[in-house]
Amino acid sequence: MRKEIPKIIQTFSEIISDNMLYADKTEYIYNLIKKFKVCFLCRPRRFGKSLLLSTIESLFSGERDLFKGLWIDSSDYTFQKHPVILLSMDFTDTSKPSLLKKQLLHSLQKIGKSEGISISDLTLDAALSDLVEGLFDKYNNFQSTAPKDRDRQESVQKVVILIDEYDAPIIDNLDKSSVAKANQITLHNFYREFKKLDKFIHFILVTGITQAGRASLGQTTNNIVDISLRPEYAGICGFTLQELDSLFADRYEETLNELIAAKQMQPSSTVADLRKKILHWYDGYVFDGKTMREETASDKPIRVLNPFSIVQFFEEKSFDDFWFQAGPASFLANLIANDPESFKLKMPPIASKRSLRSFIPVSDSPIPILFQTGYLTLNNVFLEGNETTFSLKIPNMEVERGYPWSFYQAYFGYEDISVLFLNGKSFKTAILNCDAAAIEVILETALAKLSSEQNIPMEKYYHSVIQAFINGMGIDARSQVSSSMGKSDLDLVFSDNVYVIIEVKFENEPEKSSTMTIEDKREKAHSLAKMALEQITKKECSNHYALQAKKIIELGLGIFGRSKVRVLMRVRKYAR
């Protein structure tokens, strides 16, 4: 009987009980719990961290029947039962430090209630101590034993602590730095209690999207191990190539037929072509921090595919930006909005191993946070002096298409991708039809969405805004393309050798402009558009495409104030 595709379920017991597909990660888990006591794992969102913790929870809960047929079932693992504390820090509202403390305390008390353990409501450290010691005593039958006798006994059922989304209360409040800092202190004090409770604890695993609170976590225990870049755990989350084939090979043929029918693949395409395209779209993530990346290397690093996107792909049988449609990392949009120029990648990005463990509020580079959140991945490793250094790259087509959407969100807020692409089609049609009035309406509507807090009255800011707007709609807008006499602001390349060159001119509206009418402002925008068009001519931007172009459309955009836009156009046609 063929197993079902999981519907984005993060609970191991439910996946197994309902006969759903599961990528067997139990060998990784076995090696992890045999080797370490306190571990930290950083992986991008929707990469299987919650399912990993759920699997470990079932393992330590002694639910052996769930693991029948998996690697660990035939190992020497004894399935000894341990009390487990599973906490998710992804609370509904942590916008005030008091709310984080309240929700965390409630979670501890809820676990205590389910185990029949009374939990103090005085402080978080007291509550955690009550829960850990209470579970230890209950599972080892020490309730009636004096504390001094308990300390002398050899326990076989110490407590397991699993923490998911440990960084959520910090990164959810990056736009409110005082709250983020206060939450970080709260979590630091909470984690610090682990050290005091060490003799009652068997194993701890903490997971998150970023290294936001890694420093504070590291100060709470003496022996925490960051496994995020260890090669032996590179495939602990996500689907490896072998797992892709073992899980979905029986679905390749039917998926190919539906893609051909939907004209997403050519009629002559084979299963090998389908697999190649799947890898092009969703493969490429490397978390191996040691293995060399040369193609000739015999010991190649493990690559993994985005599990969320793979599951969605085989469910919908369509190539799409599933990872981004599920909602981008909103905190990244805030970081981009505050410093858009830094987030425009210069390829190939280079970063030291040490810097990849840093975080944006501390780091001077956006590369660490882009790596941690899955927008970049490791490409090659080399020594620079005594420092281990990496070159990085965009992992796959899905991220390459979706990264510009993060810029769009930074300026204009969340918008469904399907709506964006529809708007992009309207914008492209307006350009190709040389409809200046339609372009003006589209741009003015977009610029009106800019928040006053983010607005920066500078021309380079509006260059970034216009590029983010165009790229976010799925249109490739390239900035600073060189010509014989200078660089253009933006170039667009359409099919049939049609090129669009855009120059932007901006002037801030004076504070005392109450006497200016709407028509005055539009006239001012018109003069700026005229200057922009003249600038394209002066810099001879069209010469860059003259040999291959059938048509070059030159757009002069004049922006006066926050949202008064005029567009002037000039079309050059070539006989080809």
Image: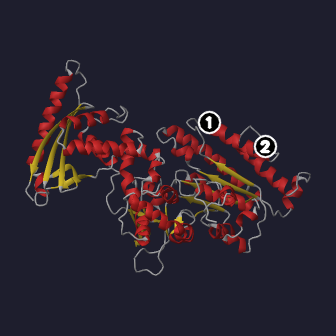
Assess disc 2: are there few (<14), some (14-19) or many (≥20) residues with their C-alpha within 10 Å of its C-alpha: few
Label 2 or label 1, whichever comes before in sequence order: 1
Residue 402: give x, y in percent of width and height.
39, 52
The residue singled out by tag 2 in the image is: 113
Q: Is residue 71 visible?
A: yes
Q: Is residue 360 visible?
A: no
**Relative to the observer, which residue lies in front, 568 or 362?**
568
The residue singled out by tag 1 in the image is: 99
Closest to the camera, between mark 2 and mark 1, is 2
Look at the image and tell me in which quarter the N terminus lies.
bottom right
Look at the image and tell me in which quarter the C terminus lies.
bottom left
State the CA–CA distance, disc 2 to disc 1.
21 Å
Residue 481: give x, y in percent of width and height.
20, 55
Q: How is the image coloured?
A: secondary structure
Q: Amino acid at mark 1?
A: Leu
**Relative to the observer, which residue lies in front, 54 or 561?**
54
Q: Quadrant of residue 371?
A: bottom left
- Helix, strand or loop for disc 1: helix
The total of numbered circles placed on residues is 2
| Furthest-right residue in this view | 144
Residue 140: give x, y in percent of width and height.
85, 58
